[in-house]
Every structure is written in C-alpha cells, then in structure tokens.
Image: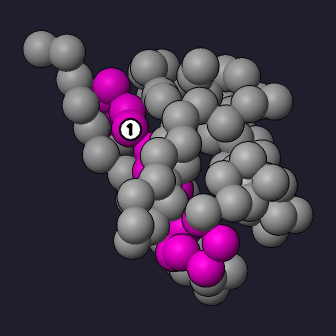
Amino acid sequence: MTIEQLDKVDIIGTDDSNIELVISDHLKWDDKNEKLLLLQDKLNLYLSFIESGEIYEHYPKAVGLPVKISIVSKYQPNSEAVKFLSLAAKTIKDAGFELSHEVKSSN
C-alpha cells in the first residue's frame, strides 16, 4: 500500500509501548506540490481512523497506548514540503498524537 491509496492505512505496527501507523511514500516531490495534497488527504485519513476509534476495533490491545504516524519517504522533501511537515507535526501533536518523517532511499 502507498500514499496514493487514500482509502487504506499502509502499515500498522504495535508493541507494548505504542502503536505506529506508517505512510509509505515512494513519490518524488513536485514543483506544483500535488504530492502535498495527496499527503494531506492521507494524513486526514489516518487521523479519522484514529479519532473515530476504528484503530481500536482492529487493534484492541492498543487502547491507551500513544499513537505515532510515521511518513517514510523515498526522496528528500522540497522546501514547501518541509514547511508542510512542520505544520502537520504541530497540528497532529495538538490532537494528542505524534508525527515523524524520515527518508529511506534505495541508493
């Protein structure tokens, strides 16, 4: 599953201390920032999944655990993406969750 599938959570992992939802991002950052719209939609899907409680229907052992959303990208973000990710992290933190971003290129 990938960032382009706006109806699915890509990856969910849990352990005794947290639950992590991963967005798998293989797309290049574009000058028109169309990818940012995809990412925004995907983050909204994840937040809805968490805030609706649906996450706990699928992972009941995660009730009460901190929730982290991780974006794993293949490419370094451009300047607009860096701004977006910073704002998104603050918004998600204000909602009571955590957002992280890392780049893992295949090089």
Q: Going 47% across and 28% down the picture, which residue do you hit?
A: 25
Residue 29's place in the image compared with 86, above or below, is above
Q: Going 66% across and 53% down the picture, which residue do you hit?
A: 59
Residue 4's place in the image compared with 42, above or below, is above
Q: Is residue 44 left or right of residue 24?
A: right
Queried whether the magenta region covers residue 65, the answer comes back as yes
Q: Residue furthest top?
A: 107
Quarter of the image that includes the N terminus: top right
Q: Position of residue 107 (x, y in %)?
A: 12, 14
The residue that disc 1 covers is 72
Residue 82 visible at all: no
What crowding class fits label 1: few (fewer than 14 Cα within 10 Å), some (14-19), or many (20 or more)? some
Q: Amino acid at mark 1?
A: Val
Q: Residue furthest front?
A: 61
Q: Position of residue 67 (x, y in %)?
A: 54, 67
Query: Which of the 4 quarters of the picture holds residue 93?
Result: bottom right
Q: Position of residue 29 (x, y in %)?
A: 46, 28
Q: Going 80% across and 54% down the picture, which residue do you hit?
A: 57
Residue 3 visible at all: yes
Along the viewing direction, whichever of 73 and 17 lies nearer the viewer? 17
Q: Going 71% across and 22% down the picture, which residue do you hit?
A: 5
User: What's the magenta region?
Assistant: 62-76
Q: Position of residue 52 (x, y in %)?
A: 87, 63
Queried whether the magenta region covers residue 70, the answer comes back as yes
Q: Is residue 42 left or right of residue 89?
A: right
Task: State the SS at label 1.
Answer: strand
Q: Residue furthest left?
A: 107
Residue 78's place in the image compared with 8, above or below, is below
Query: Which of the 4 quarters of the picture holds residue 32?
Result: top right
